[in-house]
Amino acid sequence: MKLLYSAMESHLDNLARRGTNAVMSSKSESTSARGKGRIGRTRPVWADGLKRMYDEVVDEKLPDDFLALLKKLDVDSGGK
Amino acid sequence: MSIVAANNSGEPFDFRRELTRVAPHLRAFARGLCGRPDYADDLVQETLLKAWAARDSFQPGTSMRSWTFVILRNVYLSEARRNRFRGDYDPDAAERLLSQPASQEDGLHMGDLRNAMMRLSPERREALLLVGAGGFSYEEAADIAKCAVGTMKSRVARARRSLEEMLGAHGQAARLPVQSVAHTEILAELDKVVQP
């Protein structure tokens, strides 16, 4: 979970640097240009969180039992 | 048909390799759908087996990710129907996430986002996962979810509004009681689903 939070913080900082108007943490606010943020079509912070939730799983190494299963499929298909 | 067929670019098509390539996406989609990593992985493994069994019906050159998402979705819905009274969400796990003290003040809490996602209706959650997380177009998402494009757009829009209401101005979920999810529309569709 710690990794997640640090990823989140750097992500929030990125958002802040882009001057988005997304909802941000008080911590980020104090160090960011949020006050100058435009109201507009910026993605809300949850939208990026959602994408990251997905991408983090995609980026995980495929567990061994998956690799074994996929490999076994291959072997079983020998005659095909 | 052989498992090795030429695709559009003339490269040999290796079904197993393509399946391996989409497996991480299947895990991500499944985890988003059911909210439980262990259960999600079971769903994905079953999906991989079904996809392999149905490999002759896959058309090289089309999207393996879309094709396998449809299978995963069917596996998930079948399981959801079987376990419908138990629900597919673990409220205890949600409470644990909610009670985590760390980083609550740091804006959006991923546990809050997960909790909010799980409190969406399954069809809205699925819509948001496909379009917002998976990056599918509305058209592709509608194909996967077997609904009209307009329906998909409306589900995504409503899901967004619900999330924003739940996460509030500070990106944190209101501390509302966790509700179990009901598979209404999505289960009604199941009867029409033809397993690939």
Image: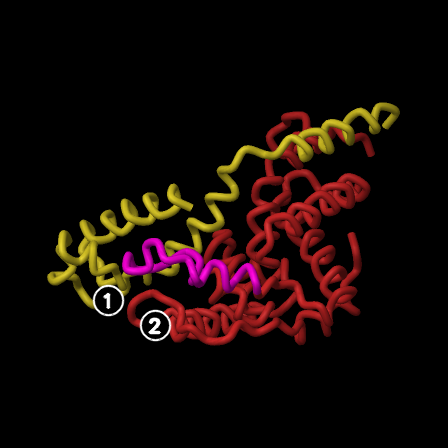
Chain colours: A yellow, B red
Q: Nearer the viewer, residue B158 or B176?
A: B176
The picture places residue B12, in percent across and down from the top left corner, at: 68, 26
Going by the numbered disc 1, the residue's amino acid type is: Gly
Q: Is residue B96 magenta?
A: yes
- The quarter of the displayed image where residue B109 is located: bottom left
Q: Is residue A62 magenta?
A: no
Extreme-right residue of the structure: A79
- Assess disc 2: are there few (<14), some (14-19) or many (≥20) residues with their C-alpha within 10 Å of its C-alpha: some
- Residue located 88% across and 24% down the image: A79
* Quadrant assignment for the N terminus of chain B: top right
The picture places residue A47, in percent across and down from the top left corner, at: 39, 59
Disc 2 from disc 1: Cα separation: 18 Å
- The quarter of the displayed image where residue B74 is located: bottom right
- Assess disc 1: are there few (<14), some (14-19) or many (≥20) residues with their C-alpha within 10 Å of its C-alpha: few
- The quarter of the displayed image where residue B111 is located: bottom left
Determine contact: label 2, label 1, CB under 8 Å: no
Q: Nearer the viewer, mark 2 or mark 1?
A: 2
Badge 2 sits on which subunit? B
Q: Is residue B62 shown left or right of residue B112?
A: right
Q: Is residue B107 shown left or right of residue A74?
A: left
The picture places residue B2, in percent across and down from the top left corner, at: 81, 30
- Residue located 20% across and 51% down the image: A18
Tell me, for residue A40, which label it has, or none.
1
Q: Tell me whether marks 2 and 1 sit on the same chain.
A: no
Q: Nearer the viewer, residue B9 or B121?
A: B121
Q: Secondary structure at mark 2?
A: loop
- Range covered by the magenta-colored residues: B92-113
- Residue located 56% across and 74% down the image: B179
In the image, residue A24 sits, relative to residue B6, either above or below, namely: below
Badge 1 sits on which subunit? A
In the image, residue B121 sits, relative to residue A61, either above or below, namely: below
Tell me, for residue B168, which label it has, or none.
2
